[in-house]
Image: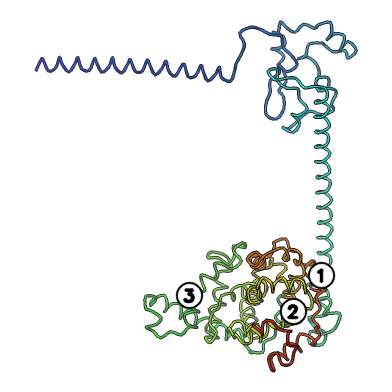
Amino acid sequence: AGSSTETHRKLSMWQLCFLQHHITNLETLTTTFVLSFRSLFSRKSKEPKALSHNATGWRLFGKTAAREDDLARDPTCTPSTQQEEEVKDSGVSSCPQRLPAAVRRKNLEFEPLSTTALILEDRPANLPAKSVEETQRHKLEYEEMVAGAKRRELKEAQKKKRQMKERHRQEDSISNAMVIWNNEILPHWDTVYGTRRVRELWWQGLPPSVRGRVWSLAIGNELNITPELYEIFLSRAKEKWRSYSETSSVNDSESGASLADRESSLDLIKLDISRTFPSLFIFQKGGPYHDLLHSVLGAYTCYRPDIGYVQGMSFIAAVLILNLEEAEAFITFANLLNKPCQMAFFRVDHELMLKYFAAFEIFFEENLPRLFSHFQTNSLTPDLYLIDWIFTLYSKSLPLDVACRVWDVFCRDGEESLFRTGLGILRLYEDVLLQMDFIHIAQFLTRLPEDLQPHTLFNAMANTHMISRNGRWAQVFSALMKDGSKELDKNSSPALRS
């Protein structure tokens, strides 16, 4: 036992010595590394040398001033004869560190405040000094940079001033229009809504405060839906969703559910609502309008089970909810989807949709022949972009404020305005689209630029003529409905030919 204890003590002492040896080596290596790291960046000379005008410290956003105590301790700051001659008229000391900023910076009337101004500074002592030509060139370059910055600042200020002026003008216009709509038009709607004055005010855009009411009056209520009827269908929808969630594991095919029932399921509506105006964050789960939109869409699927829910409906319902109360939004929504054009698209009436495309192409070719030919060359047919526009009434592809202006004209002119808007978009971006191929055109028309302004689009729409060699829109479409292309020229409708 004693021998074992002695052996254990010797082993512990050996381990301690080994550990101390390695610690000493580690400290030596650490010290060597630190000294090497410091010398790498300091590179200070052991021999004293005279300070120059570059001896003051440097930092990222300008040069630090020399400290007074450093100047007091500096024994090398002795003026030479040449320095005395250079500054004898300036009334300042010839010591470089004591020269005023204006003298050190060659009498410049500004102090560098950013890395841009470092171009004016003399180089550090360990770099070659600037020549006179280089110094002058740098000064001119800096002056040009300053002048350019001032020009940009002035241009930006003028732009903001114009925008503010335009905003005030629009606010005054909206305020005046609101008074006219509330006091002169809406109280006498049935007698004045078709007059030229009202139509011109309508084209200029409805004031937001009266927009929902005007839409509701213009679309009408041919279906005679009441708020009480909406509550009935809403309660049916809630009951259907409750039973659906309880039996969600049952296969639709086993229960004999129709296509409309499957499409009106809670899951599909929830999925589409989450993708409705996602940038607004008001229709998504937890948002203030999520349940409201869900209720309107659910009630409609029970009201029209033959149509059910179709993707794209959520955008139309959402725009109405932003401008109308819940029951009124449902009434307007149901009547809007009952219009011939919307019914054709939401019921996917292929033959009728082709007639709409054919009529559109007739006006497309007459208004924009170059772009029409470019689309034909790239095999870009109207269904690739018109379907999305018509399904959502442009509320998905256009900025919301522009889409509301499009809705204003749609409520005034009906389905013709939807295709006129499409031609206006194509006219507005004609030069851009002519440079694109099939893929890029399709992508561009699916999501139009966010900076699109209403007045630019409506100017393009105003320059779009909805009168062809075969007549106005209604006449052209009526001829197509009667007997296909027999009533029209042989080459007038590529959509029908296809």
The image shows residue 126 at horizontal and vertical percentages of 68, 18
Count of numbered circles in the view: 3
> How far is the residue under mark 1 from the one under mark 2?
14 Å
- Residue in the picture at 84% in, 5% down: 81
461 and 210: which is toward the camera = 461
**On the image, numbered disc 1 is attached to which residue?**
459
The image shows residue 374 at horizontal and vertical percentages of 72, 70
The kind of secondary structure element at disc 2 is helix
- Which label was assigned to residue 266? 3
Q: Nearer the viewer, mark 1 or mark 3?
A: 1
Q: Quadrant of residue 19 in the image? A: top left
Q: Earlier in the sequence, mark 1 or mark 3?
A: 3
**On the image, numbered disc 2 is attached to which residue?**
417
Q: Quadrant of the N terminus?
A: top left
Q: Is residue 315 above or below residue 235?
A: above
166 and 55: which is toward the camera = 55
